[in-house]
Amino acid sequence: MPECRALAGVIRRRRERRGWTLSELARRAGVSRQMLGGVEDDLKNPSLDTTSRIAAAFGIPLYQLHLEAWRWLQRQPASCRKCHYSCVHRGRQKYLNEARQCTRPQKILSAAPATRPDSR
């Protein structure tokens, strides 16, 4: 779900801005590193308790994490919110197609392979 991907991105960006490792954030939040890694990679959906522990580790209220995720979703082009294309992978934006104002990759026709000069 896009909301979970956006929340994963917010958690990852906040952690990286502070220079914390996954282990550091897991220790501060009181959750396992594997759980936190799964949340950031968008493989696991955090419970309300887990999300509130992560927010407390950052020193912010729970609603602020969700508000940041919602704002991040609103910044995405409308076509990306509706097309169900996986724009985000592991909390990071994968593609940006400027021509379409979408994060879907555009097909690129491959050119003929460049010939290598002989190394004789």
Image (cartoon, rainbow, N blue to C red):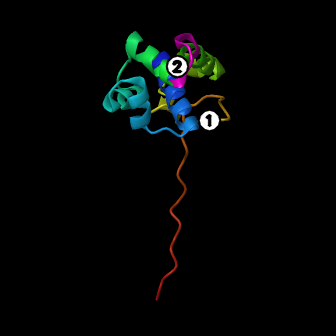
Vertical arrangement, residue 21 with respect to residue 2, above or below: below
Image quadrant where one finds the N terminus: top left
Q: Residue at x 57, y 18 (%)?
A: 60
Residue 93 x, y percent position in the rendering: 54, 33
**In the visual, does 82 lie left or right of 75?**
left
**In the visual, does 31 lie left or right of 103?**
left
Q: Secondary structure at mark 2?
A: helix
Determine which quarter of the picture holds residue 74: top right
Q: Is residue 41 visible?
A: no
Q: Nearer the viewer, residue 45 or 111?
A: 45
Amino acid at circle 2: Cys
Q: Earlier in the sequence, mark 1 or mark 2?
A: 2
Residue 36 x, y percent position in the rendering: 38, 28
Residue 73 x, y percent position in the rendering: 59, 19
Q: Residue at x 35, y 24 (%)?
A: 31
Give the magenta part as a residue range: 58-64
Q: Residue at x 53, y 24 (%)?
A: 58
Vertical arrangement, residue 18 with respect to residue 114, above or below: above
Amino acid at circle 1: Asn
Vertical arrangement, residue 94 with respect to residue 117, above or below: above
Which residue corresponds to mark 2? 83
Q: CA distance from mark 1 to mark 2?
A: 14 Å
Which residue corresponds to mark 1? 97
Q: Is residue 3 visible?
A: yes
Q: Nearer the viewer, residue 73 or 26?
A: 26
Question: Neighbour class for label 1 at 10 Å: few (<14), some, many (≥20)?
Answer: few
